[in-house]
Amino acid sequence: MGEASIKAQAKTAYETAIGVEVHIELATKTKLFCGCEASFGAKPNTHVCPYCLGMPGTLPVLNEKALELALSVGIALHCDIPAWSRFDRKNYFYPDNPQNYQVSQWFYPLCKVGYVEIGEDATKRIGIWNIHLEEDAGKLFHDEKTDQTLVDANRAGVPLIEIVSAPDMQSAEEVLAFLEQLRTKVLYLQASDCKLQEGSMRVDVNLSVRKAGNSGLGTRTEMKNLNSFRAITRAINAERERQIGILEAGGEITLETRRWDDAKGASFPMRSKEEAMDYRYFPDPDLPPVFVTEDQVEALKKAQPEMREAKRKRFVSQFGIPEYDSEILTQSVRLANLFEETAKLGIAPKKVSNFLMGEGLRILREKELDPADVQATPEHFAALLKLLEENKITNTVAKEVFEEVFVSDVDPAEYVERNGLLTVREEGVLRQTVESVIKENEKSASDYLGGKEKALGFLVGQTMKAMRGQADPATVTALLKELLKK
Amino acid sequence: MDSSKIRTALALSERIRKKEISVREGLDATFEIIDQKEKSLHAFLTIDREGAYKEADRLQEKVDAREMFGPLFGVPVAVKDNLCTKGIRTTCGSKMLENFVPPYDATAVQSLKDAGMIIVGKTNMDEFAMGNTTETSYFGCTKNPRSEAHVPGGSSGGSAAAVAAGECLVALGTDTGGSVRQPASHCGVVGVKPTYGSISRHGLIAYCSSMDQVGPIAGNVTDCAALMEALCTWDPKDSTSIKRGSLDSLTAVKQGRLDVPTYGKRGRLDILSSLEDGVPGMKIGLPKEYFSAGLDPQVAASVMRAAETLERHGAILKEFSLPLFQYFVPDYYLIACAEASSNLERYDGMKYGLRVPGSDLHDTYRKTRTQGFGEEVRRRILLGTFALSEGYYDAYYLKALKVRRLVANAFDDALKEFDLILGPTAPTTAPRLGEADQDLVKSYLADVYTVPANLTGLPAISLPCGVGEGGLPIGVQFMGRRFEEALLFKAARVLEKETCQNG
């Protein structure tokens, strides 16, 4: 047997069990336990106060909004909400953590057992073990010039939820499907912007392998520093290979935390056994238990927005757009809402959908934007589509203006006016251009006259190009036919 | 008139408000005594003469403009050095915070300012409030004003000594295991540990968060009550702060309803209006175990005399048993050290306070914390770290929490039968300087009468009830039901009047 086939056989003889720990920064205005702004990207150490700098004598006060958002996520993930939960301190020394303990939940988390459905028609349930509410840490920067490590405490104390899944996933594909579902739900709840690159969504992967057919789980490793969905996929596949390799060679898996290096395509142990942490969790005496009443849970259930599945079905029945369109539009709550609100302003739904799915998605892809970054208001989007409907601008111009509306929410009427983009339909103006196009393209002209209909299309295109897309195509075609016959 | 002859804070304020003396004159008297006594006493770590006079002038303008003010307006006050004071160094008695100047005021300090009081300085204390003699202070011990060979008690030894010496009429202390009451007892003044949650902990540098409580210290019961009223206020900055209410809502609490009462009409605790009501019919319990071995006979005799005095005034005395007595001290030290080990993690040399550079991050942590903390603080951090460690948590910390619950239940049960529980504040009069160090366990055990109030959150008061050998004061302590400080003060007032008549 060749080496490749041995490897193939070995691989199929193992099953993979994957669970994830997902940290999501909640989209609150202020931090979890103080009034500092929680927004991303400010100058270092400008969103800080005595509390989140760990000054002596300061005390935490729970942000009710963070609690509400965390509970909403728990409800959306079908979790049990216990009558009370409690905050615990996780003690560890590190400069990004001004108090040297993180306020988290360990013994009694906010939400318990729930699930997320993945796969075709939601055929597989991935279990959720718990969701807890905690503080984020600050950030460290190494200054090469002075060879010093500097602390930015802006992020310290920003509210996070940690969602811990059961080891119910068996492949990178399932993990991605789970994360997509989770992310969509959280985005629909507007509980977070869930950006992996900015760190508002962070995923740690717990993975173990076992011989196919064995019951019980193998020893797992925890993988950190996964900054994109691509890195998650690569890390899962690499870690499975690594563990199988060790077991095949007769070795044992070490229970450890590893750090994924995406550039090297490999992972490395984060700390040795001697440095193993003892977090000494204990109830935070500065914070009373959090009581959640049934009424509160009911109210939050009622306040849950329409989630993706429901919206997808409703768009088809209410607006008569194809299933496919609805599937794509509802992938992002931002696009779905833009669609719905624009259509409600009296624009044919399919036209709205076409623009969003064609142009909208293209722009997002090319500019590497997140749907959440889309600035368009339904009013401006509708105004643009009206201009097109009324033939005041051509399709080409509409596409150009759409990009401005989509990304920067310009007023389309004003933009068209300012840039002189209104469609030219005056024969007098067009006649001159058409004449010169015919002159410059004698071959095509004679082809057309010789019976090649296609040549007319080419000539129309050339005219439009000369008119920078602003000519009325019907008028141009008519003029061409008329002048060619002469 | 000579303002140094005014012996009570309420009288001083009244004279100031009646414009019989100026705010400055009141302050002059304070600094005169400080200048006289401070050199040998060492009650203060920082004196803010300039700030105090500036504030006096500002307050005088208010007097002249006849603006509204309270019963302690214009009174100088000393503040324990673990309460943050904006712009005034706050050391916590530690080398670690030797040069730490807080950017904000503790809520309790703000309450003093709101009451028109003048902060004259910051008082000495055991380092991070860990100790009961003020000897663990990095800045050296405070002497007992009654006898300089003896400690003032602790950890609020500076505040108690300052009041006892007349350096100021009232002061703030903090009480985690007796740190207000025990030094008050040793120095012969009045000190209160209010119901947990009564006075905001915002700005109180944490030692054991679930037990720390700010407490007033004064030369007499009435001043202490007035200061207590000024300090008790709900604070949204402290999640463990409680809203006090009218008598009606207190009834609700008695009925076992957990929802905390809202403000009464005055929005404040009211003690003064019932202060002179006396103790007729009041049921007072004496725990048998309190009077067992370990209690100095002269203290026992003095406390029993106090009990008899109350009986003479109509109180009903009865003995009862607290079988958990022997667990009070170990339970307290376990929980206090565990919380302290976490609360003191923030002192790492990175953000403020002492920093001793090392070869790498961990070496810097190690050097900073080894050199910044004194021996007692390091000991308690290590004990607490051990108690919370994986594998020991259940056996130590969790068990201690269960014992704490049992202790609380025992006191709650007793307080269903009794209005007050009476006992000594400390088993002996003030120890000699250096004595505590020779037998640490004995020193810890001396907290046995004070720690239950902290374990249970119940209010307690200590006031002088006699004088022992060498002229050292003896204190008596009352514990009462949650939110019912008024009862403690009524009983204390009866005793005080009697003692004054005798003395």
Image: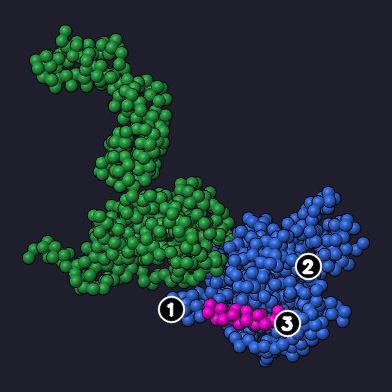
Chain colours: A green, B blue
Q: CA distance from mark 1 to mark 2?
A: 51 Å
Residue A11 falls inside the magenta stretch = no
On the image, the x and y values in percent for residue A441 come to 17, 15
Which mark, by number, is residue B283?
3
Residue B412 falls inside the magenta stretch = yes
Residue at 32 percent of width and 50 percent of height: A309
Q: Are marks 2 and 3 on the same chain?
A: yes
Q: Which residues are magenta?
A: B400-428
Say what amino acid the circle numbered 3 marks: Lys
**Residue B288 image-quadrant placement:** bottom right
Mark 1 or 3: the one toward you? 3
Say what amino acid the circle numbered 2 marks: Leu
Which mark, by number, is residue B81?
none
| Camera-side residue of A444 and A78 | A78
Where is mark 1, residue-wise?
B391
Is most of the magenta stretch helix, strand or loop? helix
